[in-house]
């Protein structure tokens, strides 16, 4: 009798145990899947180390300047190649690139139908500062002219960091690069009719405009600008975040602020007329920057993180576009953007009245600034949302991870158009970390060492979206023109509705 009773009890216990185990396993799977889905959305690089902690042990060679002596050969190279297992892991962190990456397709459209021949590349030599060739993950440079300050060195430093971040993933390529401010591959010089028209040279640079065909690329200052004591983008972004916290928007000066070099463009000279005077208060506070004086005083009055104390900050172009835009956008203040002529790699996706307030660049500029400040002080919640959208854009869409991904896709898409196999030019030398960092002076060396990529990425670059359609481009144009016309109508009617 007892035996017949125990058997059902044992079976019941086994069933309960099995159900408990199944529920536990299911719970673990649910939690794990949520973690896998959640973590990468915050930061892909941190996420991969969180889930695969052993990867933090993968270190790339550092730079040793103590025993540096240029021998013509690189001592430090990135030898880590991600294996097939790593490629499978990459799929877990696949993200879509920001929309502004789609402008890569537009920049390369002039050569989409013909491809890029070696002759096309070499035809850009008279306007190039250097030639960059990448073969089997190694970079070779032929220099044609000196760049202003250290622009070319920090641009090339950024290229080397990209090669370290994605070892074995950068395709062979051959390109020309110009480090000057203004684009100079004019459409009108290459738009002749028929098959005999001259093909434009593909030339990379920091900015473009609607009249030129230059291919835009991230500028040198993301790795630092030592000549004027501007930190690399990653630590500077952190400084700007802390600066934003020190002064709440409602407690900031209720004026528009600008400080810079007025000698480089007429529109900046014009901006001086908007300063406070006995006759007018255009609600602008404009200051001239004397970099020689600042250097002597160790840049004590030029800390960008200390300048987030005004509700409004003015952006105005210099010789060409200005690297200052990203610093202004990151400040939580409302960016008053004087009508820009140039664009860089990310600005074409900025939207008026969402990321910035548009300002006229004509003789009515001062009144345009005053109206924006008066309107904003009357509609504080609305303009604060503009400032927040801009700082969110820089924090999320312009973090260094995305800058490297933009570089990757720009070079990758460019390489697909090459109709020839790149070879090392006779006068080119291999580009080495030590050659750039060690002979540099003080702050330049520090910035380079601080921005050295220490480990390869085990996640892929973000996924590039397809090219814009003609309808997409029309919608973008309308999306920008409509709010600008609205503001101009408000200004004309002096409307504060």
Image: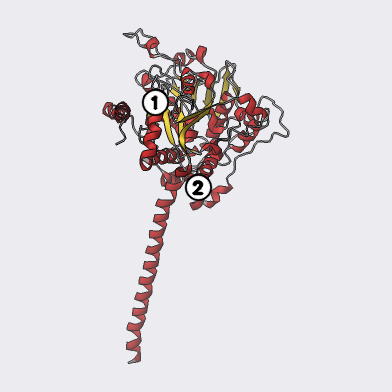
Instruction: Indicate the quadrant where residue 230 lies.
Output: top right
Query: Which of the image's four quarters has the N terminus?
Result: bottom left
Which dot marks residue 301? none
Measured as percent of width and height from the top left, residue 163 is found at 53, 33
Tell which of 219 and 288 is nearer to you. 288
Which residue is label 1 attached to? 367
Q: Is residue 6 above or below residue 338?
A: below
Instruction: Indicate the quadrant where residue 223 lies.
Output: top right
Measured as percent of width and height from the top left, residue 18 is found at 37, 72
The residue lying at 51 percent from left, 49 percent from top is 49
Which dot marks residue 46? 2
Left or right: where does residue 296 sit relative to residue 94?
A: right
Q: Could you classify mark 1 by the number of other residues whose Cα lies within 10 Å: few (under 14), some (14-19), or many (20 or more)?
A: some
Q: Is residue 464 visible?
A: no
Q: How many callouts does the rendering have?
A: 2
Measured as percent of width and height from the top left, residue 375 is found at 36, 35
Q: Is residue 263 above or below residue 284?
A: above
The reply to whether discs 1 and 2 touch (Cβ–Cβ < 8 Å) is no
Mark 2: secondary structure: helix
């Amino acid at each position: 009798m007892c035996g017949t009773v125990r058997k059902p009890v044992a079976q019941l216990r086994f069933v309960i145990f099995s159900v408990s185990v199944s529920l536990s396993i299911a719970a673990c799977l649910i939690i794990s899947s949520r973690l896998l889905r959640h973590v990468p959305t915050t930061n892909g690089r941190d996420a991969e180390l969180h889930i695969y902690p052993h990867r933090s042990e993968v270190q790339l060679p550092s730079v040793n300047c103590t025993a540096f002596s240029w021998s013509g050969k690189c001592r430090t190279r990135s030898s880590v190649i991600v294996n097939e297992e790593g490629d499978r892991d990459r799929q877990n962190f696949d993200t879509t690139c920001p929309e502004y990456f789609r402008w890569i397709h537009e920049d390369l459209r002039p050569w989409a139908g013909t491809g890029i021949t070696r002759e096309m590349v070499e035809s850009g030599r008279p306007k190039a500062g250097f030639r960059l060739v990448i073969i089997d993950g190694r970079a070779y440079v032929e220099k044609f002219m000196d760049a202003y300050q250290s622009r070319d060195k920090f641009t090339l430093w950024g290229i080397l960091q990209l090669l370290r971040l994605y070892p074995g993933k950068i395709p062979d390529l051959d390109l020309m690069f110009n480090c000057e401010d203004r684009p100079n591959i004019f459409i009108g010089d290459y738009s002749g009719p028929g098959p005999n028209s001259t093909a434009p040279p593909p030339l990379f640079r920091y900015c473009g405009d609607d009249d030129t065909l230059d291919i835009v690329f991230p500028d040198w200052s993301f790795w630092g600008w030592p000549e004027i004591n501007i930190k690399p983008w990653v630590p500077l972004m952190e400084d700007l975040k802390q600066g934003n916290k020190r002064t709440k928007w409602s407690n900031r000066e209720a004026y528009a602020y600008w400080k810079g070099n007025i000698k480089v463009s007429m529109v900046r000279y014009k901006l001086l007329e908007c300063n406070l005077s006995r006759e007018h208060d255009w609600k602008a506070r404009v200051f001239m920057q004397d970099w020689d004086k600042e250097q002597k005083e160790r840049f004590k009055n030029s800390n960008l993180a200390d300048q987030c104390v005004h509700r409004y900050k003015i952006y105005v172009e210099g010789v060409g576009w200005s690297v200052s835009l990203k610093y202004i956008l990151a400040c939580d203040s409302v960016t008053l953007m004087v009508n820009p002529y140039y664009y860089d790699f990310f600005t074409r996706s900025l939207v008026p009245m969402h990321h910035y307030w548009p300002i006229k660049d004509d003789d009515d500029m001062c009144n345009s600034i005053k109206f924006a400040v008066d309107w904003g002080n009357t509609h504080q919640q609305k303009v604060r949302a503009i400032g927040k959208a801009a700082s969110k854009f820089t924090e999320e869409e312009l973090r260094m991870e995305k800058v490297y991904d933009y570089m990757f896709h720009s070079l990758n898409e460019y390489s697909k158009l090459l109709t020839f196999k790149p070879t090392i030019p006779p006068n080119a030398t291999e580009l080495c970390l030590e050659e750039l960092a060690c002979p540099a002076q003080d702050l330049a060396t520090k910035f380079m060492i601080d921005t050295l990529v220490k480990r390869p990425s085990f996640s892929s670059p973000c996924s590039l979206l397809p090219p814009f359609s003609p309808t997409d481009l029309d919608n973008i144009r309308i999306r920008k023109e409509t709010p600008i016309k609205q503001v101009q109508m408000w200004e004309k009617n002096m409307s504060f509705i």
